[in-house]
């Protein structure tokens, strides 16, 4: 897809990967519609030309407004980037279920409803691209964020199923699975903080700009699944070929995380 003149709706666009995506798509000549809770940050990211839709995506009315406003302004919707999400670093068996529901509402239900709203328009215009920003932990569960991993596994499965369901309408789906991205994501988690051991990891770390460029290239080149950095595929392969070994190693790491936090 040549992105010049295309309409791109990006969620969670006020900072981090979403803001970097706005810059990456703008450099390629796309028309931007940006949504997140902070209007001031969205305006700083998008500049005077971007359409700004401020609101909380856990509210269905905001999801509908984001798609409707985009179509009203631009008359088309070519690319939807479901980037908004929230983390949770907490033991699974003691996490209140209302917190789990809040996480799944943003990480899974919001992307699903946005897809349901956007797909009919994309089908009528002859196609489009939907990008779901998942995580490497949506391929390999990390025990210090099990519930978050579960939400991202679900998002990956949703992406794969919809790719088959909507292929005949010309709608492509891309799952993006970053490793550790150097953003403020951990500071906004619903509970807990990223383990210090994770923060010290370098092999699987990338910047938001690197992730956004990978996303934009995937849209241009019709990729299906993106794992960034590419070394993440080694972890995915290990999980498939020797799950017992990975379980053992991650269990050891989790015990060390518990000792650090305890």
Image (cartoon, rainbow, N blue to C red):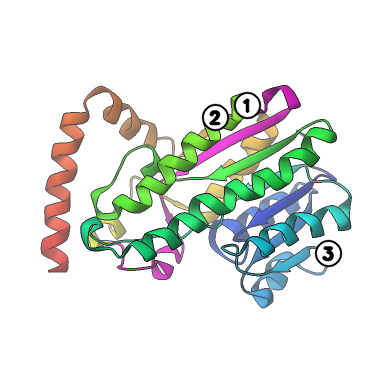
Distance from disc 1 to disc 3, alpha carbons, whole Å, reads 34 Å
Q: Write down the region rendered in magenta.
A: 165-194
Residue at x 12% of width, y 56% of height: 256
Do the CB atoms of the residues marked 1 and 2 lie less than 8 Å apart?
Answer: yes
Do the CB atoms of the residues marked 2 and 3 lie less than 8 Å apart?
Answer: no
Residue 67, percent from left and from top: 75, 54
Do the CB atoms of the residues marked 1 and 3 lie less than 8 Å apart?
Answer: no
Q: Is residue 11 left or right of residue 91?
A: right
Question: Is the residue 60 above or below the residue 226 in the image?
Answer: below
- Image quadrant occupied by the C terminus: bottom left
Q: Which residue is mark 3?
A: 49
Mark 2 surroundings: few (<14), some (14-19) or many (≥20) residues within 10 A: few
Mark 3 surroundings: few (<14), some (14-19) or many (≥20) residues within 10 A: few
Q: Which residue is mark 1?
A: 165
Q: Quadrant of residue 182?
A: bottom left
Answer with mark 2 or mark 3, whichever residue precedes in sequence. 3
Residue at x 34% of width, y 61% of height: 97
Residue at x 42% of width, y 59% of height: 101
Residue 230, percent from left and from top: 43, 35
Residue 80, percent from left and from top: 68, 46
Distance from disc 1 to disc 2, alpha carbons, whole Å, reads 6 Å
User: For numbered disc 3, what is the local secondary structure?
Assistant: loop
Determine if residue 154 is in view: yes
Q: Nearer the viewer, residue 66 or 74?
A: 66
Distance from disc 2 to disc 3, alpha carbons, whole Å, reads 35 Å
Does the magenta segment cover residue 62?
Answer: no
Residue at x 22% of width, y 29% of height: 243
Q: Nearer the viewer, mark 2 or mark 3?
A: 2
């Amino acid at each position: 897809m040549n992105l010049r003149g295309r309409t791109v709706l990006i969620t969670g666009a006020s900072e981090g990967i979403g803001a970097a995506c706005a810059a990456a798509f703008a450099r390629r000549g796309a028309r931007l519609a940006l949504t997140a809770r902070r209007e001031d940050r969205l305006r700083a990211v998008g500049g005077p030309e971007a359409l700004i839709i401020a609101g909380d995506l856990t509210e269905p009315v905001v999801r509908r407004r984001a798609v409707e406003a985009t179509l009203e302004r631009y008359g088309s919707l070519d690319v939807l980037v479901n980037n908004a999400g929230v983390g949770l670093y907490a033991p699974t068996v003691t996490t209140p279920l209302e917190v789990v529901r809040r996480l799944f509402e943003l990480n899974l239900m919001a992307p699903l409803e946005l897809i349901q709203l956007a797909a009919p328009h994309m089908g009528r215009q002859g196609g489009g691209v939907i990008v779901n920003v998942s995580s490497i932990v949506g391929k390999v569960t990390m025990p210090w964020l099990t519930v978050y991993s579960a939400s991202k596994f679900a998002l990956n499965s949703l992406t794969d199923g919809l790719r088959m369901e909507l292929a005949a309408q010309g709608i492509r789906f891309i799952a993006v699975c970053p490793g550790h991205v150097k953003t403020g994501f951990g500071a906004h988690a619903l509970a807990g903080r990223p383990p210090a051991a994770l923060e010290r990891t370098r092999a699987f770390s990338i910047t938001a700009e690197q992730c956004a460029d990978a996303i934009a290239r995937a849209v241009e080149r019709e990729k299906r699944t993106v794992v960034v950095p590419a070394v993440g595929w080694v972890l995915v392969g290990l999980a498939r070929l020797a799950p017992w070994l990975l379980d053992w190693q991650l269990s050891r790491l989790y015990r060390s995380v518990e000792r650090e936090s305890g």
